[in-house]
């Protein structure tokens, strides 16, 4: 669970970095989408990424069922050190719900963008122009609001999941753990800011 989570975090980092090129104009963004749609390494990584998502999501449901069965009516109990931390304590109790929200929007996102651009290139079809598609869709107010809500759920999910993954891997001593918690907060906030900036830019520019 922790390994697949960190793998997906790496993907999100690359994804937001690539998509921020939309701020540089259509030429830069279209060049990036062309590269991502035709480069052999990217094509190999697509099924690997899909497998990573499937394993992460599937195992999260298995763990949730095991935890519920083990704890009975007590529900999900966060570790003692997480209690009293407000939003993080809430996130730890609702990771599965947050994950389902993220998954739902991911399916919507892929059906509107990936299927109309990269998938068309893979299958020999005619892909839509990435810059026009993204700015037109994300520039729609209700769509933009929905995406910001999605990014908020992603922020909660990653903010807790990031440090939790390292804790699972054994990096949880008193010296390192507080630093990891800070890095987790900063990283998830920067990720949220990057994705949200793209949406705001599409709405107003």
Image (spheres, grey):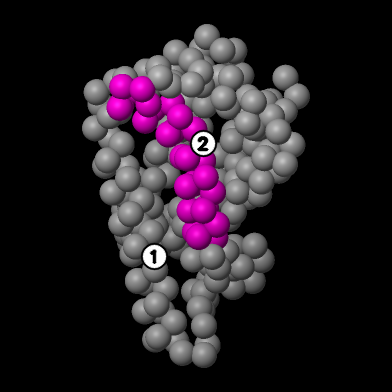
* Residue 7 in view here: yes
The residue that disc 2 covers is 112
What percent of the width, then of the height, locates residue 163? 46, 56
Report the residue at 44% width, 60% height from top: 164
Residue placed farthest to the top in the image?
27
Horizontal arrangement in the rendering, residue 65 relative to residue 85 (left or right): left
Q: What is the magenta range?
A: 98-125
**Tag 2, which secondary structure?**
helix
Circles 1 and 2, Cβ within 8 Å, touching? The answer is no
The answer to whether 113 appears left or right of 205 in the picture is left
Name the residue beneath numbered marker 1: 60
Whether residue 134 is situated above or below residue 65 in the rendered picture: above
Residue that appears at 36% across and 22% down: 125
Query: Quadrant location of residue 82?
Result: bottom right
Q: Where residue 126 appears, x then y in whole percent?
A: 40, 19
**Residue at image coords 49%, 33%:** 113
Q: Is residue 120 magenta?
A: yes
Q: In the image, is residue 23 part of the stretch drawn in magenta? A: no
Residue 55, percent across and down? 30, 57
Residue 139: image location, x then y, percent: 69, 29
């Amino acid at each position: 669970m922790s390994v697949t989570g960190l793998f997906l975090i790496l993907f999100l980092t690359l994804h937001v970095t690539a998509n921020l090129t939309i701020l540089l104009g259509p030429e830069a963004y279209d060049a990036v989408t062309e590269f991502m749609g035709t480069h052999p390494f990217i094509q190999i990584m697509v099924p690997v990424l899909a497998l990573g998502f499937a394993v992460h999501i599937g195992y999260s449901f298995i763990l949730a069922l095991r935890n519920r069965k083990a704890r009975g009516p007590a529900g999900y109990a966060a570790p003692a050190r997480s209690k009293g931390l407000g939003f993080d304590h809430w996130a730890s109790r609702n990771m599965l719900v947050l994950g389902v929200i993220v998954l739902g929007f991911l399916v919507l996102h892929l059906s509107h963008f990936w299927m109309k651009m990269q998938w068309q290139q893979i299958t020999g079809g005619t892909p839509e122009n990435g810059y026009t598609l993204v700015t037109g869709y994300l520039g729609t107010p209700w769509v933009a609001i929905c995406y910001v809500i999605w990014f908020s759920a992603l922020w909660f999910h990653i903010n807790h999941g990031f440090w939790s993954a390292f804790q699972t891997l054994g990096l949880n001593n008193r010296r390192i753990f507080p630093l990891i918690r800070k890095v987790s907060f900063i990283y998830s906030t920067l990720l949220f800011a990057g994705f949200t900036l793209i949406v705001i830019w599409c709405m107003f520019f």
